[in-house]
Image (cartoon, helix red, strand yellow):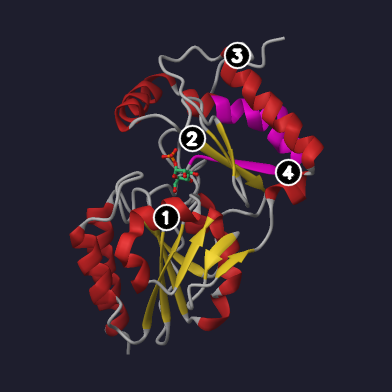
């Protein structure tokens, strides 16, 4: 039987919640950033103007900088380049794998510990069948990437070239391949297994246990800061910044459209912080 049900899809593309707007306090602040679409273009390296902005922010004694992304550490390092030295924490895989202030590596938990290998195998089989049935212009390799704290699933495959990635973005805009796959997976598998399926990038989605979203990293920092301000571009329902930007009680959420807007908001927040009485 085909794993692709013949049904009409109604996507919840409307934003269901606004970013949290917690008032800022005097004291220590952590500026916490998503990477793709926020500090850099998707899967691209950081540009000089962003580096300069972060460098300036890092000179304030009462401000620390950190990142939290769905990607794994090698991808984050590649994109951040020398800006990594400006960061107090580099949270990857939503904080399940991270570098601390001494740049020591921590691996907190594994998605396979949560699921067990039998259930993980069922999940892989479900996704492989779905992808096999998909008629899309290009398929490459690495359709399922098992990381530590999450599984990344890509219908075109992570081995695609930049040109193939760009073409998929256009194709997906029209055909909603990722959104349909995500919804089918949630309805048929993820919901009953306690898994969240979240779109963080352009060619794939991330699957992880409920609660292992970007809020996960906050437990490592919340006690040390008076303010935690999170910046992200995917704060809409189904995006991987949604939970931390809208639901979290500890952070202020700042929704950005692109890295240029992030720079504007960083400058505004720094001004707001330094105007506090
Ligand atoms: O950091 C955001 C996302 O970046 C990549 O997404 P894609 O390759 O689809 O653009 C992936 O590493 C994904 O896991 C991550 O959430």
Does the residue at mark 1 contact the one at mark 4 (Cβ under 8 Å)? no
Please tell me whether mark 2 or mark 1 is closer to you in this view: 1
Disc ID at residue 204 = 2
Kindly identify which residue carries mark 3: 7
User: Distance of mark 1 from mark 4, alpha carbons?
Assistant: 27 Å
Residue 37 spot, x, y in % from top left: 34, 48
Percent across and percent down for residue 85 are 35, 72
Front one among 151 and 27:
151
Separation (CA) of disc 3 from disc 2: 22 Å
Q: Earlier in the sequence, mark 1 or mark 3?
A: 3
Evaluate if marks 4 and 3 touch, with contact meaning CB atoms under 8 Å apart.
no
Residue tagged 1 = 76
The residue mark sitting in front, 1 or 4, is 1
Q: Specify the quarter for ligand 1.
A: top left
Q: Nearer the viewer, mark 1 or mark 3?
A: 1
With respect to residue 40, does 49 lie above or below? below
Local SS, label 1: helix
Q: CA distance from mark 1 to mark 3?
A: 38 Å
Q: Of marks 1 and 4, which one's residue comes earlier in the chain?
A: 1
Residue extent of the magenta highlight: 181-199
Instruction: Report if the beta carbon of the residue with label 2 is closer than 8 angstroms to ligand 1.
Output: yes
Distance, label 4 to label 2, CA atoms, is 20 Å
In the rendered image, which residue does mark 4 sit on? 194
Residue 129 in the magenta stretch? The answer is no
Q: Does residue 182 sit above or below 264 in this rendering? A: above
- Mark 4 or mark 3: whose residue is earlier in sequence: 3
Comes first in the chain, label 3 or label 2: 3
Q: Residues within 10 Å of mark 1 (few under 14, many from 20)?
A: many
């Amino acid at each position: 039987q085909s794993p692709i049900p013949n049904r009409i899809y109604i996507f919840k593309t409307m934003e269901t919640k606004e970013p949290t707007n917690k008032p800022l306090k005097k004291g220590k602040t952590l500026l916490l950033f998503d990477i793709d679409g926020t500090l850099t273009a998707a899967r691209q390296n950081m540009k000089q103007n962003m580096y300069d902005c972060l460098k300036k922010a890092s000179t304030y004694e009462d401000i620390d900088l950190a990142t939290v992304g769905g990607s794994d550490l090698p991808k984050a390092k590649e994109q951040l380049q020398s800006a990594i030295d400006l960061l107090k924490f580099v949270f990857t895989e939503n904080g399940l794998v991270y570098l601390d202030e001494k740049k020591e590596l921590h691996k907190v938990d594994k998605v396979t510990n949560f699921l067990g290998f039998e259930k993980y195998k069922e999940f892989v089989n479900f996704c492989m069948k779905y992808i096999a049935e998909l008629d899309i212009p290009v398929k490459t390799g690495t359709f399922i990437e098992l990381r530590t704290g999450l599984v990344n699933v890509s219908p075109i495959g992570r081995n695609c070239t930049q040109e193939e990635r760009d073409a998929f973005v256009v194709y997906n805009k029209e055909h909603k391949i990722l959104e349909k796959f995500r919804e089918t997976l949630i309805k048929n598998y993820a919901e009953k297994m306690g898994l969240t399926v979240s779109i963080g990038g352009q060619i794939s989605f991330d699957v992880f246990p409920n609660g292992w979203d970007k809020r996960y990293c906050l437990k490592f920092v919340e006690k040390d800061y008076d303010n935690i301000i999170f910046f992200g571009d995917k704060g809409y329902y189904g995006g991987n910044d949604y939970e931390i930007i809208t639901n979290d009680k500890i952070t202020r959420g700042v929704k950005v459209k692109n890295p240029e807007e992030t720079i504007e908001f960083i400058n505004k927040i720094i001004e707001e912080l330094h105007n506090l009485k």
